[in-house]
Image (spheres, rainbow, N blue to C red):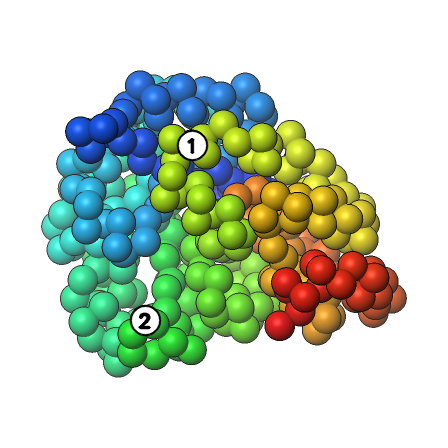
Amino acid sequence: MSHYDDIRNRIHRQMVPLPILYRDDYSIDHAGLAKYVAWHLENDTQNFCLTFTYSQLDFVTAEEIVEVTRTVMEVVRDDAVFISCTGGGPLREAIRSVQAFEKLGAHAAFVHLPEHCLQNPSHCGELYVEYIRGVAKETEIPLLAVALPVPWSAPSQTMLPIQRFEELCEEEQFIGIKDDIYILDNRMELARKFSERMGITGGGMFTHYIFFHHFPNQGEFAGIYNPKRGQRMFELLDENNYLEVMKMMEADGQSGLTLPDLHWMARNQVVFYGMGFAETYVMRPPIATATEAQAQAIIEHMHQTPTLFEQVGR
């Protein structure tokens, strides 16, 4: 097994997206971040990632991302997988960042869409593939793409069309993608075509994401964000016990979580995937598929809980 296969296989199940913790003067609270990471390690977290929305990237520099990576790796070491991320700057900046991540021991890196791709939506896929390949030529750690829509110009289109993944999959160093919540159909096609070749993560699944990322100091030790509880969900998913997963998550719904993705898939009898808490879930082969009977049982259960059904049935 190659190093890239090893990391891809370790990016599995629950993944904790790390917030940037700030002090009152807006400097980064590295001690608080280290404490936060240590808490998750103690609670059996196996995967961490650092990724941003593009509005957040306006407030963090490439140098700060490197320092955050240093802080995380001093705690994680090799006890879990940590995926750092580039800042969406020019190619040379991304290369320098990933080279710094390598020296610090990070296991992989998300390569954010650079600004020039965002400014050229009609050629974004082509430019982004070229950009990732440029980073790969100068680095060695596994790389993952970040595919987001452009809501201000093309809300139903992805910035990285499906066909571009075939090009990226030619690169051994390319091991996965973070796909966006708003392009669910695209994600399903990704799962069908590429799940055996790459890890697929997704963001923004729960409403708790808003609370957690925008108010990290209040949310960092919230009881709902419980790694061990997340692992129990995966055990149920491994057993194809989707109805019990629904019941567990319905109970969590009392704390403000909603389940649009889960219900969408049950209703349409499509690929069922594993979910982690708060923001990110991960699809890894083998992907369990809900049978018609299981999907119908879930739908009937949803109809028996009208309040929750109203939340997620639109």
Look at 35% across and 25% down and name the residue there: 33
Left or right placement of residue 239 versus residue 158 in this view: right
Image spot of residue 252 (x, y percent): 66, 44
Dot in front, 1 or 2: 1
Q: Position of residue 70 (x, y in %)?
A: 27, 26
Quadrant (top left/top right/bottom left/bottom right) for the C terminus: bottom right
Is residue 16 shown above or below 42?
A: below
Give the left or right position of residue 263, taking residue 290 as reference: left
Q: Which mark is residue 150?
A: 2
Q: Mark number for residue 256? A: none
Distance of label 1 from label 2 (alpha carbons): 30 Å
Q: Residues within 10 Å of mark 2 (few under 14, many from 20)?
A: some
- Secondary structure found at label 1: helix
Residue under numbered circle 1 = 218
300 or 92, which lies in front? 300
Question: Judging from the image, what secondary structure is the residue with disc 2 in?
Answer: strand
Residue visible at 26% across and 49% down?
Answer: 56
In the displayed structure image, the side of residue 77 where residue 192 appears, left or right: right
Which residue type does callout 1 highlight? Gln
- Residue 250 in picture, x, y percent from top left: 71, 50
Earlier residue among tags 1 and 2: 2
